[in-house]
Image (cartoon, grey):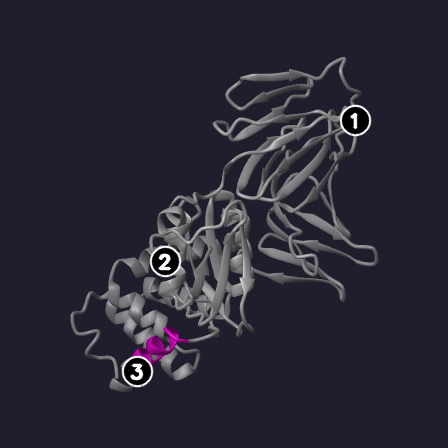
Amino acid sequence: MNDQAAHIAQLIKKLFDGSLSAAEKIELNSWLEEHPQRKSFVEGLNKDDALFEEALEWISLAQEDSEEWLQRLSATTWQRIQQQQEKSQIKKRSPKPWLWYAAAAVLLCIAGASIFIQQQQESTNNSLALNQIKPGKHQATLHLPDGSSLTLSEKQDELQLSDKRILSYKDGEMLMDLNGKFKADQDLRLSVPRAGHYKMRLPDGSLVWLNSASTIRFPIAFQQHRLVALNGEAFFEVQQLKDNKNRARGFSVNAPNQSIEVTGTQFNVNTFNKEALKTTLVEGHVNVRSAQHKLSLRPNEQSVLSPTGISKVAIDVSTEIAWKDNRFNFNETSLQDAMLQLSRWYELEIVYKKNIPDTYFYGEFSRQQPLQKVLKILEESGVKFEFK
């Protein structure tokens, strides 16, 4: 086997054991997209050694552009691949972290669940009205220390607070000069409703993406240590700063039952599930503290704080931060978790009419689609629902 084939084989092996990095995932995706047969074969592979060895032979032949590569696969191998594909259409849970293709806006799992979906503002079963339920948009409210508030423009996507205490949009349009109105240590609160998202540039230059139903609290001017408080979900891109003694200035995020300590880094904090608070590190270094525990995260690691304690796991961060780029990314995502994401983004109430089996979704698609298109995807995946 040549070097390239050996490298591809190693990527496939990493795919199966869950250690494939984001960059390697892109590389393997590109290789698979060159020939439809490659995707069919890889999706059908099992983890047993015999089949994997046959995969190595297939990879070698494919690299030589042999037209006989498919015929040289054993009949048993190809039959098992087809059987795996048939099972994947009706499985409740996948044993592997399959590779997903961003261009395919489909879910690859069957649910078999009956769901009642109700729009909170109005009651209707009209299909036209269903199509008119649009995805979330840029919307947020800034709450000032005196109790007043500013409704931010839906035509803008980022609010900025300069170190000179000037509030403005990213394009330079000024909103307010806070000098003389409030003290430096007083807090501002930016809240994003359901079906909304917004970005906040903090006084130190750090950038925060806020997901739907999320709130961040921060001071008008940071002191030596930078501290913000979060409820909901946010992605942080923290500026690395030094003090006058060339020491790193700390940055902390207070979230329910935990705090995250950083210097300069990129990470995601999700507090929606009060039973499992998650911090996901993309770049840099963070320490996560609870009342009784502390752990450190490296890139591509996630901490999970639950009532039983705090732990960490290695993950593919792309699933956790897809929302930042306005995408849904489901990778062994439970039906309940998937529906919670949809309910926040489209401002829906989800009611399960009967017990829901263990059902998991896989796939990636844009959050910019109207609800009708998303529900069509669910229908094609086997989910039955009523809309009123």
Q: Is residue 378 above or below residue 45?
A: above
SS state under label 3: helix
> Which callout, 2 or 3, points at the residue further toward the start of the chain?
3
Residue under label 1, please give it.
Answer: 186
* Measured Cα–Cα span from mark 1 to mark 2: 47 Å
- Name the residue: 53% across, 24% down: 170
* Identity of the residue drawn at 35% across and 74% down: 44
Outermost residue, right side: 292
Q: Quadrant of residue 24?
A: bottom left
Residue found at x 49% / y 50%: 123
Residue 100 appears in view: no
**Can residue 31 be seen from the camera position used here?**
yes
The segment highlighted magenta reads 80-90
Viewer-proximal residue among 123 and 90: 123
Q: Could you tell whether 304 is left or right of 6 in the image?
A: right
Q: Which residue lies under the disc numbered 2?
A: 376
The image quarter containing residue 50 is bottom left
CA–CA distance between discs 2 and 3? 34 Å
